[in-house]
Amino acid sequence: MVKKIFSGVQPTGNLHLGNYLGAIKNFVELQNQDKNECVYCVVDLHAITTKQDPKILKNNIRETTAAFLASGLNHNKSIIFQQSLVPAHSEGSWLLGCIARMGWLNRMTQFKEKAGKDKEKASIGLYIYPVLMAADILLYDSTHVPVGEDQKQHLELSRDIAQKFNLDFNKPNFLKVPNPLIQKKFARIMSLKDGTKKMSKSDPSDLSRINLTDSEDEIINKIRKAKTDTESLPDNEIDLSKRPEAENLLGIYSSLTNQSLQNSINEFSGKNFSDFKKNLTDLIVAKIIPISNEINKLKKEKNFIDNVLSEGSVKADKISSNKVKEIKKIIGF
C-alpha cells in the first residue's frame, strides 16, 4: 500500500539538532522507503501567527529549505514547497473552518500555552491555525503524518474535520482520515543546559542547542559545556531516566548512531562523562558538519533555492487546487 506522507516545518530560523533528530531525519528515512509519496512544506503561513520581520522571514524560508536539502531530502523524489505560494491552503482552510467547531478549537492546549494569560491579545490566526494545518494535510489525501506528541492533538482535529465533512455531505472516505506517525524514540531532544526542557531556538542561551549551521569549534565547545552530573554513566534505563541530562546526551548519541538506548548504555556504562563527551562530540561533528557546510553553501544559491520551492509549489498546487475544486462542488458552489 502506498503511504502518502505530509509534514511541514515553520521557517523561524536557527534549525537545530532537535529539529533534525525529531523531524527532518525521519522525513529523509520516509522519503527513501519504497512506495512512499512524500510532500514536505515550508509552512510560512503558520509562521505569521506572530509578527515577523519580512526580510528575516524570507531568509528563514530559504534557510529552512536549505536545511531540508542538506539533510538529504531530494526535490526530485519528494515535493518540497512553500505554503504561501499555493493558494489552495488558504482557501481550503476557510472551507474546512466552516466544518470545524469552536468546542474543538477551545480544547487545543497549544493555543493556551502560546497565548498565555492574555488571550485577548493573541491573533485570530494563532487560534485557528490548527484548521490551516488540517487543510495542509487533507488537501493531499495524506494517509500518514509524522508528528510529535505536541502536534498529535492537531492531527486529531484534522481527523475530526475529515470525518464530519464526509458525514455531513454523505461522501464516505472523500477526505482521507490521516494516521499519525509518532516517533517513539528520541523525538524530543532536550536542552544542553537543562535536561528537563526541550531544545529550542527561542532559548536565549545559544549554548543550549546545537544549531545545524554551527562550526566544528562551536559544537566542541557546546558539548564540552553541556550540563552533566558527577556520577559515572549507569548500566540500565531505569537509573538513566532519573538523570535527565545524561539521558538526553545518550539519546542524542543513540539517534545519531541508529541504535537502541540500551546499546548505548552498554557501550558507555561505568565510564565518566569526559570519555563519553569525546565520543559524542566526534559523532555530532561527523554527522552535522557536512549538513552545516551544505546549508551555508546553499544559502548563497538563492536562485536555486527559489527554483526548488517554485517547482515544488507548482506540483503541490496541482494536487491541492483539484481537491479544493472537488470540495467546492460537493458544498454546492
Image (cartoon, helix red, strand yellow):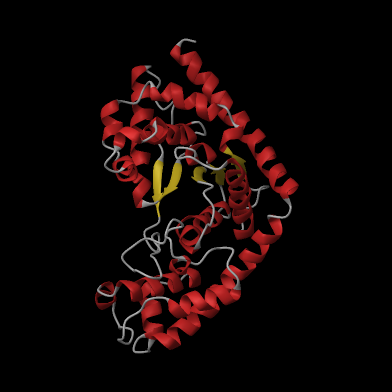
User: Residue 37: image x %, image y %?
Assistant: 56, 44
User: Residue 249: image x %, image y %?
Assistant: 40, 74
Q: In the displayed structure, does residue 136 sit left or right of residue 213?
A: left
Q: How many numbered circles does the render carry?
A: 0
Residue depicted at 61% across the width and 41% down the height: 81
Residue depicted at 43% across the width and 61% down the height: 204
Residue 137 in sight in this render: yes
Q: In the displayed structure, does residue 17 sit left or right of residue 74?
A: left
Furthest residue in direction top, as rendered: 332
- Residue 39: quadrant of the picture: top right
Residue depicted at 46% across the width and 69% down the height: 207
Residue 1 in sight in this render: no
- Residue 230: quadrant of the picture: bottom left
Decide: is 299 above or below 257: above
User: Residue 67: image x %, image y %?
Assistant: 60, 56
Depth check, front residue: 18 or 162: 18
User: Residue 183: image x %, image y %?
Assistant: 40, 56
Depth check, front residue: 11 or 74: 11
Q: In the displayed structure, does residue 8 sit left or right of residue 232?
A: right
Decide: is 152 above or below 264: above
Decide: is 216 above or below 101: below
Residue depicted at 34% across the width and 51% down the height: 149
